Amino acid sequence: MHPQNPYYKRYDLKRLVKHHAALQKYIVLNPAGEETIDFSSSSAVYELNKAMLLADFKLADYHLPTGYLIPPIPGRLDYLLHVRDFLSEKLNNIVDSKLHGLDIGTGANGIYCILGAQHFNWTMVGTESDSKAVEIAKTNIQHTKALLDKVEIRHQENKSFLFRNIIKPNERFDFTICNPPFHSSKEEALKGSLRKLKNLGDTTDKKERFLNFEGQANELWCNGGEALFIKRLIRESILFKDQVKVFTSLVAKADSLLKIEKQLKKLKANYHIIPMSQGHKKSRCILWWFDL
């Protein structure tokens, strides 16, 4: 985990409960007698992450309906910290300046926009094709006055496009971010959920719980999985190379990299890969640019 991530060590559950009392009933003791939560429970994970948003990112309130992807705050913040470091190096140490970022597929949780605004004081635009998710994200933004001038959620009405119809003429962004759908089908997503919960010690056989733990269909899978989705991002990004300084995306699967790098080389883009890890989970962030 990034050394500047405030969740680098164990969660201070007692402190978090002071900001969000609903978390208390989900706290249990591990075999060592230490306080923790049951990470196989979507309700427990939701209340933990809500507590972090209220305590550490000064949200007035936050609600996410059952069935939508619950964002793990430490991992999401890690991605932004690595992007910040890269931008600081590439853009001549402008880390203290107010950057302008675009989140592709912000989802109902709108988490990258919230963290970007509240932790880094960036101005953020989040784009989402699911109209219901757009309304949920907008409602959460409206709960907190500090977000109103820093975050805008835009509806992508044409699912064939990613940047088009979103980036306005003469609009400039310092960076884009994306947490793409990892899986290529519902069946693959379900298997991934089963493996994840099994690793957490949950052996119950409740498919509905597994799906709720992971999120909505458009958050979980798409034709071709993450490799094809990111290739689409890359192909469309060249149309906006004069309006965006650095494009980025998470890459969950190591075997996706070969296809992604091939696409970048084909379009003669510069790129850089940052390995990331949180506990036993390993991923990577890929960044590309056409001219800096």
Image (cartoon, rainbow, N blue to C red):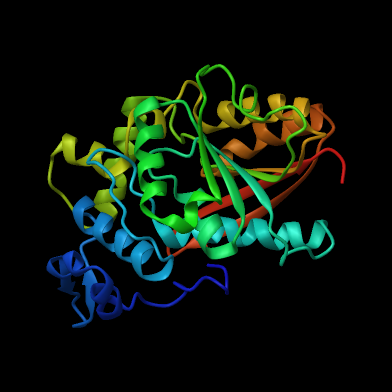
Q: Is residue 214 above or below residue 159?
A: below
Tell me residue 55's x, y (percent): 36, 70
On screen, residue 206 versus residue 96, left or right, reads: left
Picture residue at 58% right of the left edge, 57% below the top: 80
Query: Which residue is farthest right?
Result: 291
Extreme residue in the bottom direction: 33
Give the vertical position of 6 relative to 149 (above or below).
below
Instruction: Tell me the residue at 77%/32% (across/down).
Output: 170
- Relative image position of residue 122 (x, y in whole percent): 62, 56
Q: Residue at x 61, y 32 (%)?
A: 230
Question: Residue 266: horizontal and vertical position, in percent?
Answer: 80, 27
Asked if residue 199 can be seen in this view, the reply is: yes
In this view of the protein, which residue sits in the foreground, 125 or 179? Answer: 125
Q: Position of residue 168 (x, y in %)?
A: 69, 28
- Specify the quadrant of the image occupied by residue 48: bottom left
Nearer to the camera, 30 or 87: 87
